[in-house]
Amino acid sequence: MHVLKPTCQPEGLLNRVDALIKDGHADAARSLLAAARRLSPASPRHAELAARLAMSEGLLDTARLELDAAIADAPSNSSLRKLRAEVRRKLNDCVGAAEDAAEAVVLAPRDPIAKALLGVLMLDLQRTGDAVACLREAVAAEPANPAFREALAAAHDLSGDPDAALVVLADGITATPAHVGLRNAAVLLCVRHRDFLKAVCLAEEGRVAGVIDACLFGLKGHALSSLGRHDEASEAYAEALKLGPEDPYVRHLAASAGIVPGAQRAPIEYLRTVFNGYADRFEAHLLSLGYRVPGLIRATLQAHGIAGGPVLDLGCGTGLLAVVLTDLTDGPFVGVDVSSEMLVHASAKQLYTELHQADVLDFLRDDARSWPLVLASDVLCYFGALDELFALVHTRLSAGGRFVFSIELLQPDSRGVTHGNGEWILGRLGRYAHAEHYVISHASAAGFVVRRITPEALRNEADAPVEGLVVVLERGDAH
């Protein structure tokens, strides 16, 4: 039970409310705020605390109404404008949020937080030049603020200047060498741009400087794996696992190195973390790898004369499949993905009638609709065992419905040895590959008729093609 110390000073009460909100004591904060409002006239501070309390409880519409009324009474209060910008952003009103942040900058031109907030919102609106300008001013005002530097680096990267992004992060590391987030951001930047040697060097510099962090070691392992230095990668993953034994990102990468046995699928938290951070670069990165899967699925549907709808797009990501297929199928498209940031990009394409943030297995269990066509582009590579996925998709297909998907192909190594359990294996970069016979046998066991399996190169990786299969299954009568 939370015990409140008595005070009769209105300002003291409000400070106590602020502390309670920050500590997560919403009920106590609500009671004390009501008392404070009885003791003194309405003020912007009352409204700000009421809005923060509502935000802490997920009541964004309530927070917005509180701030609307307060700003109508005190239109020149920059703090209220900044807070409403945060609320509107959470409500996906990025244009309105940017308007509030811009007004806050006008009202308080020396406030670096207002400038940083406006810069982040400019990024949301894909106005990268304006974002860089705002965030550069924020960093100039508070050069030791790591959050400002990370945001400015992201703006440079999205504007096509990763070198400038790395300089911003490197300067921040020099100023605050113990800050883990800046080092991780720098290493991740290099990994995303496939400068794996630089990523390893930066991670090693962090270790030498005394930064002991599970994510840093995990990123180092990922970079080493990408360079083919798998023994060193395993050592890095093992160190990461010691530091973060419950971290889903670390555990999945450790499993890919064979350190954690029995991982039958990528954890939801791992996928959400990876793809939320990857969303803004996802399409450009895939295109740079010669990514072919959406086009291959289109060609497969054309070859089979499949044009029915509605279409369920499992793991829809940024909506690349809908872009490729919108003139081919009758639609409508319904997309499912674990990453909220990927869904923002899918929504912007305006090709989906519904988008759901969910694990694909949970969606298939909970949504009772039948679908004539279910698609999965680069989704099964995050599952090892496919039995449950096949069974659920079969249940949700209408009679004669088709399930079309890609998989990465499990192949023997240069000595002819097939690793894993002979059916599937978790690769060193965190994706699963499957044997063709495994897909056929388990699809058949789930009640499918295998209509087509086509070997294809899915994309390039480390200057070599990633071999896979494009598969067409039809719901049979077995179940």
Image (tube, helix red, strand yellow):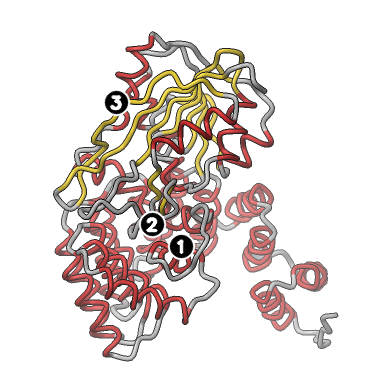
Q: At which x and y percent is residue 460?
A: 20, 44
**Camera-side residue of 151 and 82:** 151
The answer to which of 397 and 123 lies nearer the viewer is 397
Disc 2 marks which amino acid?
Gly
Among numbered discs 1 and 2, the one appearing first in the sequence: 1
Secondary structure at badge 2 equals loop
Reading the image, the residue beneath label 2 is: 430
Q: Which quadrant does the C terminus fall into?
A: top right
Q: Is residue 75 visible?
A: no
User: Pointer 1 and pointer 2: residues touching (CB < 8 Å)?
Assistant: yes
Above or below, 155 against 2 in this view is: above
What residue sits 45% from the left and 48% below the top? 382
Q: Number of callouts in the render?
A: 3
Disc 3 and disc 1: Cα gap in Å?
29 Å
Of mark 3 and mark 1, the one earlier in the sequence is 1
- Mark 1 — residue? 252
Q: Which residue is mark 3?
A: 296
Q: Amino acid at mark 1?
A: His
Asked if 273 appears above or below 38 in the picture, the reply is above
Q: How much space separates mark 1 and mark 2, taking CA atoms?
A: 7 Å
**Which of the image's four quarters has the N terminus?**
bottom right
Locate residue 424 relative to residue 456 in the image: left or right: right
